[in-house]
Amino acid sequence: MVSKGLMDLWQRRGRTFSERSSLLQRAEAVQGVMDESLLYLQCVKGIVVDVGCGHGIPTVSLVQGHQVIGVDFASTMLSRAKSNIPSLDLLRASIDHLPLRTASIPAVTCFFVLSDYSDPTNIVNELGRVLQVKGRIILADYSSNDDLNNVIDDLQVRILGRSRGMFRPTPEAMSMLMRRTGLKVKAVKELSHPLTIPLVNFINQLYLSSVGVQYREKQLSKDQWMRFLGGWLKGSKVHLTRRFVLVLGEKTSS
């Protein structure tokens, strides 16, 4: 089961996640991932289960062509998802123990969830369990080459003195994760999106993060932030490249 600590963390994150996502232009950044995902799901008839739907940024694309059930364990996230997508069916559940019948779902998606887990194998096993034979599965997450998360990882160590300890997959690692759970990999891609945001927005999104209070307590000046960010700054803007791993798969046997 998902740990209580992680559940509590995402319950808190859910209160500021939408605002932080807006500052990071998350919807625009992941659009390429969603375009590829929708193409892969074109032939799917029936329900798509979006596991770890959060407040619904990927899900809003899925509902344009499919009946979708959004699953999350944080009620704050589900409330925001329902506000964003009133037609969405929602299910609050632990994402590694889904209250769904074995081999009952035509398609399962999991966007930007696995990076919270040091070993996400149990989650992918559970996605495979509920998937029908010939059902389609999509995994997407932040690449090990994603500038934003690498910069934030570095800042947290240098400023707060602690590691985030998050899973950062390469395309090969994500493919291996799917194969280890008995699923067939159909395609693997690393997609990129340029991100340019004002320095003040970058700082504010850190203040909205789960360790935002600790950043605020440091009371860093603008000049200090600029020194920490160094070569990522051009003028008063932070320039990064978002990189995402996308793996498209299929369940070939029961």
Image (cartoon, helix red, strand yellow):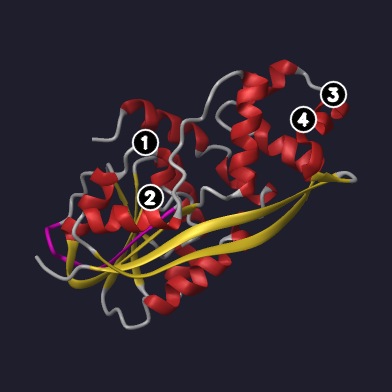
The residue that appears at 66% across and 23% down in the rendered structure is: 158
Q: Amino acid at mark 2?
A: Gly
- Secondary structure at badge 1 equals loop
The residue located at (77%, 18%) in the rendering is 219
Residue nearest the observer in this picture, 173 or 201:
173
Mark 3 highlights which residue? 221
Amino acid carrying mark 3 in the image? Ser
Q: Amino acid at mark 1?
A: Ser
In the rendering, at what x and y percent does residue 156 appear? Answer: 62, 27
The stretch of residues the image draws in magenta is 101-111
Q: Is residue 89 above or below residue 213?
A: below
Q: Which residue is mark 2?
A: 52
The answer to which of marks 2 and 3 sits earlier in the sequence is 2
Horizontal arrangement in the rendering, residue 63 relative to residue 106 (left or right):
right
Instruction: Of the two numbered discs 4 and 3 on the same chain, state the one appearing first in sequence.
Output: 3
Can you say whether 156 is above or below 193 in the image? above
Q: Nearer the viewer, mark 2 or mark 4?
A: 4
The residue pinned by badge 4 equals 228
Q: Report which residue position mark 1 lands on.
A: 118
Disc 1 vs disc 4: Cβ atoms closer than 8 Å? no
Label 2 with label 4: CB-CB less than 8 Å: no
Horizontal side of 134 relative to 85 (left or right) equals left
Does residue 197 appear anywhere in the picture?
yes
| Mark 1: few/some/many CA within 10 Å (<14, 14-19, 20+) | few
Camera-nearest label, 4 or 3: 4
